[in-house]
Image: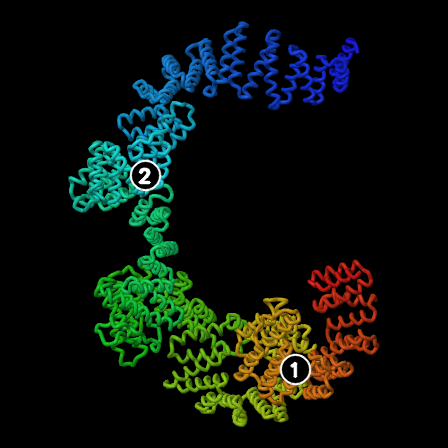
Amino acid sequence: MSSKEIKATLKNAREAIRNKEYKEALKHCKAVLKQDKNNYNAWVFIGVAATELDQPDQAKTAYKKATELDPDQLLAWQGLQNLAEKNNTSDNRHELLGVYQKLMELYESSDKQKWHEVCLKLVDLYQQEKKYPEAAKTWNRLIQLKQQDGADKQELHQLWKKMIQLFGDKAENQDNETQQLLITAFENVLSSLDKIPSDNHQKLSTDYIKFLSKLPHEGDKLKLTCEALIAQYPKSSSLLQVLAGHFMQTECFSEEAFQCYTRLNKMEPMNGLGLIGQGIKNMQEQKYEEAAKNLTEGLKHARTTVIAWLYLAEIQLRMHRYEETISSCRQGLKWLEKSVHDGNRYQKPKLQFLQAEALVKSGDADNADIAFGILEQLPNNEPVQLAMKGQAYLNKGQMEQASKISTDLTKSHSDLAESWELQGLIDYKQKNYMQAELSFRKALKINEDCGEYYYYLGLTYWFMGEEMRKDKTKTATHLLKAAKLDTYNGKTFCYLGHYYRDVVQDKSRARGCYKKAFELNNSDEEAGAAAVDLSVELGDMETALAVLRIVTDQSSAGAAKWAWLRRGLYHLRVNQNSQAVADLQAALRADPIDSNCWECLGEAYLSRGGYTAALKAFTKANELNPDAVYNIYKIALIKQILGKYADAVAEYTQIIQKSENYVPALKGLGECYLMMSRNALKDYLDGRALDSAEQALQYLAGAVQYRPDVSCLWKLIGDTCTTLHVLSPAKVNVEVHFVLFAQIEKTNVHTLNKSELLSLGGRCYMRALTLMSTSANLWCDLGVNYYRQAQYLAAHHDTGEENTVHELLEKSLQCLKKSVMLNSKNHQYWNALGVVASCKGIENYALAQHSFIKSVQVEQNNVVAWTNLGATYLKNESVELAHEAFKVAQSLEPSYVMCWIGQALIAEAVGSYETMDLFRHTTELGVNTEGAKGYAHWVCATLQDKSNRNSELYKYNIIQMNAISAAQIVMSKYTERIRTDPIAFTMLGYLNEYLNLKKQAAEAYNRAVMLLQNAKDNEKLLLARRNWARALCTAGHYQESIQAYVSNSLTEFDDITGIALAYFKKGQLPESAKAYEKALSIAQTEKEKAHILIALAMIEIKSNRMDNAKTLLFKCSMLKEPSVESLQALCALGLLKKDTTLTTAALNELFKHWDKIASTYETSLLSSGMFSLQSNSLAVQRQASKAVHSNPADPALWTLLCRVVPQHTPQKAEGGVVAGNVAQILSSHHSKNALLFSAVNQIAAGKHAAIDNNDNALKTIQKTIHLYPDDPTVWASLMAALHMEKTLSHLNGKHSKLTASEELLVVAITSKIKTEKTMPAFYLQSLENWSLQQAATGLKEMGRHSDAEAFCSKVLERYPDHPAVFLLLRQIQCEQLLLSQQQLPDTVLEELKKAVMSNFTSITAWHWLAEIYKSQGLMVAAEMCYRQGLQLSSKQGDTSGKLSSLLRLAMLALSLSTVKQNHRWTSLVKEATNEAQKICFCPLAGLFQALLQFIVKVGARETRRLLERVVYQPGYTESIATVARWYLLRHLWAKNDDTLIEVLLQNAKMKGDSRVEKLYQKLNESS
């Protein structure tokens, strides 16, 4: 290619680039380079095209090749510039520096503008690369070129200014050449300003001197420049500050420097450098307080000034502020490390030495370790440093090392005071005070002006002994000298305070010294505490509080315990309890294990009323200091205040065990037991009240034995004696310590009755009055005691005591008048005076009314006085006034019971229907004698009126309000306290009869008879005996009942019928018949005659004369007013004789008198019995259900339904469970039967623990046993439930956790049967027989054959003619033979058949024999046995037996159908299962039908339908469904129906049927 062609190609490449056809351009360039490898333009064009195509590496290579070919050409360099600027990477920036330099070289002569632009870019790049010297030189070159080109002054000024802006901030890091360039720049900028002086000039000047201040070697220039500028700008503080900084940096503290600091302070009072300079000047003048203040304040604004930290540390050390010294040294060292001035480096050892000295002088062992490290860093191991090291060893308790250093120093440097100081301190620590004195004196000879040595010497004399302390020339003189030389050592003043306080006894001067010591060192707790304590003693509370306030304001959390504690005690003393609590809590943060602080905090809480918090505080104090009795006492006292008397007693007892003569604890015990006695009396727990009162008297007697001069103890004894006035005299028999009597007798205790106890109370009140005769409270208590004594004498003694009673009442009246005279503002005194004035024997109603009114006037919210005023009006028959007074009392306190009793009495007097409600309300508010008797009277009266039983008032007052139980409870408490009221006991007995509390009723009637025997009212006595005799008969005490009836003259109808019933119950039928016949002769009404005829009929039935009984009952039904009871008896007789005709006729006749039937239960029971007699089990259940639907609120009917379901329709057992639960909810009287029948239903329904662990038959039976442990039926049910659980565990292959033994349960049932008297004998015998059979069966089924055989043999020894047990024995023996897998001989089979024939009516026996025949292969014989069982069950009407026989028969035929498909057996399966399905829904029958179809034709559609019905339809138990599911899977597998198989497997998984899943796996494996 020729040169012409090359040019054309290059031209084409240029055009391609212009048209942005970069790839085409590359082709042209490459074509050129093939001919001419060194073609400059081709390489440049390649660079351009590659750049545009984003191929930077190729572009760079091309440009570099071009620059190598022609370094002086611009194009390639410009390309490199553009490429590098476009890709701003680290490598590119580095290359860009060279490119810029080359471009500047090329542009310098050709293009000044371009050169200028590249120069600016180069400077900027140098700065980015932190190459400041090169950048400065480049900029300076720019300025020089501008000067050569004749740039104007303003342009040059801006360039110099720009240079300062670019490089001035980092001047201290630049080299000397750059710094000189910057100085030149500043000088040129300042000189080029048009206006001088000006703000701009001043600003630039300030920047200039700040710049110079960063250059240590330019100090002279800085000083001269500053002086010149200050002369120009005398008001500029910034210039002064720079100059001051220079002086501070050079540590120049000449007069010139101080003038600078002074001028700066005047301009800016808070300028840091100015304050520091002023502080240093104050230090030189020994004004340490001001110096420290100025330096501290100055360093807040100039923290980097290391010299200031050094001087501050030195001042603080001289002022003995060691912690502050250490902190200042650390700050100085920290800023020193950051400093760039080498001139400051010499300050480091000074700061380290000061820090080490402060650490050592602080005396802290931990600081000593830090000091060792610092001393090791110091360059020179000087003697002073060694002495300091010795003191550090001394602080750590390392005497040996300290002594070694001291010995070396005293030998080598005996002229050094620090050597002898160290030796003296060692001797002082070792309590070698004589040697210490010599050492400190030697130190003082060397340095006479050291106050610290005088302090050590004074301290040595202080501890030398008592005599030396009193020697003023020794201790006091040296301490005073130390205080004079070193006025900042607080310890010196502290010991001077000790001296003045303990030796001179000058508290005022001592307080001054302590105060001075505390002012010098406010962390000195000893000085501060002493200053506060002395100020308090001197009555200067303001000073004390000021000291405490200083400490508490400055202290951090968890510090200054002493101050917080003392301030808290002060606030506690002035009753500022909340503030006291806060202060004491702060004290505890400082020391959480100080028991005294906890104790004080408890007192503060207690004063504030925070009893719970106080209790916790005292408890904590007691934990920390268990030996302190006071804490335990306070704990007991708080618990007593909170009403936790039993807990308080335990705490007080703990104190008495430690200190038996601690009177406050004895008093507290007495008070607690007194309050417990009062609470027990309030709850009518009289026995407990008596015991508590006796305990109270015991402890109070012990207290007065130690402190007989304390009146409150005697008052408490009087209160205890008087409190028991409400108790029955028969109960009060209290043992009292001899100390409470005037004379000391032989015995330590006296037993007092109620009269003597009340008298003792009066004497104790008088003893208290001798100690405090002006106590109105004591006079009132004495008056009340006299009143109680008079009440007792009036109620329990003969008429001869009337004078004594009157005398006591007069004394009471006078005492109460005295109390009112002493304190007329107490409403209780007026109220007590009114009560005594209105009582029988005084009856001064005017005085009473006046007293009650005065009581109300004194205290308007006075419910007791208003109630008593109402009672006074009522007693005087002013009903309206009484009602108003009671109404006011009710409004004041609705829960006060006595005002409600008053309203009830008014309602009773006016004949209001609300009387009973009011009396009931009084019993709800609390037990009280008046309300209890009134309510019981109205309940009994309402119960006796049998004409109102269906009224709404009766239903509400008696039934809905549970009146009988409520009245019985309150009357029980009433009769416990008042044992002399026969009417009350009669009412109690009547109520007990209603509640079926037979024994309690007989006891109550007996007490009424005993009380009435001495009375003259024979009519009441006869009535009481009749009641007693009736109750005895009801309770089963027939002989005692007969005797009680005989004691009455048997002329009354009730007495005769009563004794006749007693004879009947006792079994004396002839005597009973005679008595009834006598009663029949005097019977006045048809109803009475009917009842007697029924009773005679019952006697005939008992005598087995059924026809006579029937005649009597027919005779009874023929009366003008036929008795419902006679028809019921006639129906029952028909059931007994199994006479369906008689039963039906009697029932039909009974239904004609439906409106006269009081209870539906008996009729429903008889109707159900009739259907049972007809073997119509479903009708039995439906009859009971019908009765429940008609009367859903009758619990007896629900119980009946629950009872008949498991016997007649066991398939509905779950409904029976529900019926039992409803019966329990409706009434507690039916709970036993309801629970028992519910459990039987649960057994019938199969509700075992595996299904529901909380609701199953066993749980229900266990609950029933806990409630009724004496019922043998319940124990028999437990045996059945246990058998069910064990059987299920055995079937599931699990070990049963139930360990109850059948033999033990039989023993329990037998023992309960022997003590049971209410159940019929034949029923009990049947129950015992069943339990014996069940026990043997259980043992057999659990595989315990030997135990079962032994049990049966044991039973047969006791009951030889027990066919059922004999059969069980044969079954057990036969089963053992079968287990040996031997063929049974014909003789054995015949023997077994005979055993079954002896129990011909036993269906289970025939079933068992059939199983034996099956095992021997005698299938026809087995079939006949099952058919025999079916026949028996049909005759007996036993649905369960019939169903069992059919299913067993079907299973037998099904098993034979699998062996050989015989039409006879398949037909038998169908026949048996169909019959079973007719009886009830039978899941097992459905399964048998499905299995038969599977056997006949496995793949038939009917097979799938029957199996799916069992598997998927509800009502089939899981055990049955599992079997069906297994066969259904085989059927579906045979049909290859994968969809239905998947559905079946999901169902099995949901039900937890793993057998089906395993079968499916095996089928898959086999295929």
Name the amino acid, label 2. Answer: Ala
Side of 965 where 698 appears, left or right = left
Give the crowd class for mark 2: few <14, some 14-19, many >=20 residues within 10 Å.
many
Depth order, front residue of 996/1144: 996
**Quarter of the N terminus within the rendering:** top right
Say whether residue 706 is visible.
yes
Residue 744 lies, in percent from the top left, at 22, 74
**Quarter of the C terminus within the rendering:** bottom right
Where is 331 relative to 149, above or below?
Answer: below
Side of 1195 where 829 appears, left or right = left
Q: Would you name the residue on which mark 2 appears?
A: 392
Where is 488 relative to 1451, above or below?
Answer: above
Residue plotted at (70% across, 67% down): 1518
Residue plotted at (49% across, 81% down): 998
Q: Would you name the residue on which mark 1 appears?
A: 1372
Residue plotted at (23% across, 31% down): 415
Q: How is the image coloured?
A: rainbow
Say whether residue 1122 is visible.
no
Depth order, front residue of 1329/78: 78
For the image shown, how many numbered marks are present on the structure?
A: 2
Q: Which quadrant of the structure image shows residue 1226?
A: bottom right
Name the amino acid, label 1. Answer: Ile
Residue 284 lies, in percent from the top left, at 28, 25
Give the crowd class for mark 1: few <14, some 14-19, many >=20 residues within 10 Å.
many
